Image (cartoon, grey):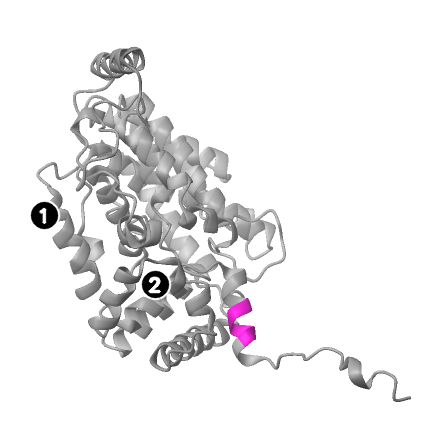
């Protein structure tokens, strides 16, 4: 769209005001919007856009197809009919809210924080971390490398969205998503500010070729570090509340070394962690958790793994779910090898890309990774529907021509 001279002058002044605002209000350790880097120039340059670069990235993420699929993706509990337990869509909102609170108190860039937080789990697969483990096993057994949701989130953002063109997000957002690693807790989070796009691309590719490579990654911004610890804060107490709701654990069974420091509700746990981080990290180029709070957090994490995440009650159906993943993978591989255009992998997936993007996979004979990409993007409901379509007999309906025989 071509703007008039008057519009352009006003927009230029708005952009200047935003630069001045960030200069006045943001910490010296914050990542300014003017520091954003993209692989390709935007149609409206970040320097001329009234939406700051990271604010614009958050808009792109929210309007992506991958983001809409959060609505029916498992957080922890897959097979419970309870509308009050956490799903992935709520989790990312909680991460965003918590991270922005910490970021605001520390004078960091809330736009960058929000973009990373909203996008960080786009690569999560049906049935949560269990599904991720099964897809990783499929990749290993079929010489496809490895699977991790961090890198898959970036793949959706950088490659799969917009018919295979990607969203052209900033380096800082993509790096924050790749390095979020909410399953790993530390007492200190310090960014690696030396990264550039070449380094990021190398780390991204290594996540698919080296086992557990993503666990080595460190965010390049302090905002990325905030999202990383906020991921933990968002789920650690919330999972306790969900488990109590589902009667898997009792509140009075929480360890005393946890409750005496963090309290015994999601609210008190969040408040204790956020407050401690803000106090110990204010006006510093890193995030710090005090020794006492960190010890309690580790104890709570250990308790959750033993009593919630590995609870035999919620693992009872694991073998069935695993078989579903392997069955769908094999079916879709055969569909591509036989060029079965009636398969939903064509009609609901491959046909949505530009032909040049799909041809790249076909020519590289890497159709296995193409199938993994398709399965990883499924919601739980769609995944189940696809499996049923392949495994259950299809009804033919009434044979109208025979209805009047009796």
SS at circle 1: helix
Residue 114 position by quadrant = top left
| Quadrant containing the N terminus in the rendered view | top left
What is the number of the mark on residue 225? none
Q: Is residue 272 above or below residue 12?
A: below
**Is residue 100 in view from this perspective?**
yes
Instruction: Give the spatial CA distance, label 1 vs label 2.
Output: 24 Å
Is residue 135 depicted above or below 197 in this figure? below
- Classify residue 10 by image quadrant: top left
Residue 134, image x, y percentages: 37, 70
Q: In the image, which disc is placed on residue 373?
A: 2
Q: Tell me which residue sits at (35%, 69%) in the image.
A: 371
Query: Which residue appears at 44% of the width and 48% of the height?
Result: 255
Q: Which residue is mark 1?
A: 198
Magenta extent: 385-389
Q: Are marks 1 and 2 in contact (CB under 8 Å)?
A: no
Q: At x 50% / y 61%, what residue is drawn? A: 380
Q: Is residue 70 magenta?
A: no
């Amino acid at each position: 769209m071509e703007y008039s001279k008057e519009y352009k002058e006003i927009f230029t002044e708005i952009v200047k005001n935003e630069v001045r605002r960030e200069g006045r209000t943001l910490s010296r350790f914050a990542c300014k919007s003017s520091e954003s880097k993209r692989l390709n120039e935007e149609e409206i340059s970040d320097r001329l856009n009234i939406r700051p670069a990271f604010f614009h990235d958050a808009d792109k993420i929210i309007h992506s197809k991958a983001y809409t699929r959060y609505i029916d993706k498992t957080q922890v509990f897959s097979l419970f009919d309870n509308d009050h337990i956490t799903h992935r869509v709520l989790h990312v909102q909680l991460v965003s809210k918590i991270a922005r609170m910490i970021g605001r108190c520390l004078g960091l860039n809330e736009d960058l924080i929000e973009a990373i937080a909203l996008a960080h789990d786009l690569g999560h697969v049906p049935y949560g971390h269990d599904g991720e483990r099964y897809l990783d096993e499929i990749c290993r057994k079929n010489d496809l490398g490895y699977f991790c949701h961090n890198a898959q989130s970036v793949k959706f953002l950088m490659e799969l969205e917009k018919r295979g063109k990607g969203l052209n997000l900033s380096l800082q957002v993509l790096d924050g998503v790749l390095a979020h690693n909410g399953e790993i807790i530390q007492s200190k989070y310090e960014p690696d500010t030396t990264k550039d796009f070449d380094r990021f691309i190398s780390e991204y590719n290594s996540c698919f070729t080296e086992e557990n490579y993503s666990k080595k990654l460190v965010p390049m911004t302090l905002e990325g570090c905030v999202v990383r610890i906020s991921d933990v804060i968002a789920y650690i107490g919330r999972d306790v509340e969900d488990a109590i709701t589902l009667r898997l654990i009792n509140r009075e069974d929480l360890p005393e070394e946890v409750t005496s420091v963090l309290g015994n509700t999601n609210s008190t746990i969040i408040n204790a962690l956020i407050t401690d981080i803000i106090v110990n990290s204010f006006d510093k180029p890193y995030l710090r958790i005090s020794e006492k709070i960190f010890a309690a957090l580790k104890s709570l994490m250990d308790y959750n793994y033993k009593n919630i995440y590995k609870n035999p009650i919620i693992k009872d159906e694991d073998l069935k779910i695993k078989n579903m993943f392997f069955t769908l993978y094999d079916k879709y591989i055969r569909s591509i090898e036989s060029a079965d255009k009636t398969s939903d992998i064509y009609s609901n997936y491959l046909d949505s890309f530009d032909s040049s993007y799909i041809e790249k996979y076909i020519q590289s004979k890497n159709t296995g990774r193409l199938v993994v990409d398709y399965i990883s993007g499924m919601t739980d409901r769609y995944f189940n529907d696809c499996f049923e379509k392949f495994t259950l007999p299809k009804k033919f309906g009434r044979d109208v021509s025979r209805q009047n025989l009796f």
